Image: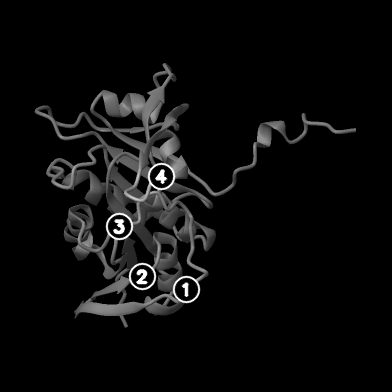
Amino acid sequence: MTNRPLILITNDDGINAPGLRKLISLVKHLGEIVVIASEHPMSGMAHAVTIQNPLRVRLIAEELNYREYLTTGTPVDNVKLGKHKLAGRLPDLVLSGINHGSNAAINIIYSGTMGAVLEGLIDRIPGIGFSLDDFSPHADFSHVDEYVVSITKKVLKDGLPKGVCLNVNFPVKNNEPLRGVKVCRQADARWVEEFEERTDPHGRTYYWLAGRFENGDIRNDTDEKALADNYVSVVPSQTDFTAHDHVSSIKFC
C-alpha cells in the first residue's frame, strides 16, 4: 500500500510517442504511476470504445510505484481498463498527452486525448489533457516542463470543481519564453473539411480526409487567442452537453 496519489496516464499517439514519454518523465515523482497506452496511434478517436473485439493487455514495465501496460484499445478503453481492472483502485487523477497537435477549440470533440480525460470525469476523477500545438513527430516539448508540473501539482493539491476537467494547450516552441497561463473559453472555430479523391490500381475510388482550420472568433478570451499570444491555454471542460440557458426557452407546444 502507498499514500502516494494514484495517477493514471494515457494518450492517443501510442505507447512510444515522445509526448507521452515527456509527460511520464515530468510527473513520475508526484505519485504512484500507472501508464496504459495503445500499441498504435489513436488520434481522432474521441470517446470511441472497442466493442467488436476483445482487448489485449500486456505489462511491459514495472518498478517501485510504476507500472506500464500496452493495449490494443482506444484511449477511452485504456481509462476504463485502468479504473476497473489494472490500476488496483480508482485513480486520484487522470493525465492524458502530451498530444502532438492542438486540442483547442472544436478539436476537443475529436480528441482521443481529451476523450480519455472525460472518461475519467464520468467517475468523478479529476483529469488534465495536455496538448502541444505542433503535429511534428519531432516536436520540441522543452518549454512545457514547469507548466505541466505546476498545473498537475495544483490539481492534486486542490482538486477541481465537481464535473470539471482541464483542457491544457501549449503554443508551438518559438524563440520567446511562454508568457504564462490563461484560463479561458473554447474558441468558436471549426475545420472546413475537404476530401482528396484518388483511384487505386484496381480502378476503385477512395478518399483522404483533408481540410483547413478556420477561426472566425475574434474575441480576446479564447484558447486560440491565448495560444496565438504565446500563453498556455487552460479551458475548464465538462461532459454535460446541455445548453442550460435554453432549456426553458425552447418550446414545442
Q: Earlier in the sequence, mark 3 or mark 2?
A: 3
- The dot on residue 41 is 3
Q: Looking at numbered disc 2 in the image, what kind of residue is underneath it?
A: Thr
Q: Residue at x 29, y 79 (%)?
A: 58
**Residue 230 occupies quadrant:** top left
Residue 33 location (% of width, % of height): 27, 69
Mark 3 Cα shell of 10 Å, populated few (<14), some (14-19), many (≥20): some
Q: Which residue is mark 4?
A: 206
- Distance between the Cα atoms at labels 3 and 1? 18 Å
- Between 191 and 139, the residue placed more toward the observer is 191
Q: Looking at numbered disc 4 in the image, what kind of residue is underneath it?
A: Tyr
- The dot on residue 53 is 1
Q: Earlier in the sequence, mark 1 or mark 4?
A: 1
- Distance between the Cα atoms at labels 3 and 4? 22 Å
Q: Earlier in the sequence, mark 2 or mark 4?
A: 2
- Distance between the Cα atoms at labels 1 and 4? 26 Å
Residue 206 in the image: above or below residue 183: below
Q: Residue at x 40, y 52 (%)?
A: 112
Disc 2 is placed on an element classified as loop
Mark 2 Cα shell of 10 Å, populated few (<14), some (14-19), many (≥20): some
Eye-nearest disc, 1 or 4: 4
Residue 36 location (% of width, % of height): 32, 68
Quadrant holding the C terminus: top right
Q: Are marks 2 and 4 in contact (CB under 8 Å)?
A: no
Q: Earlier in the sequence, mark 3 or mark 1?
A: 3
Colouring of the image: one colour
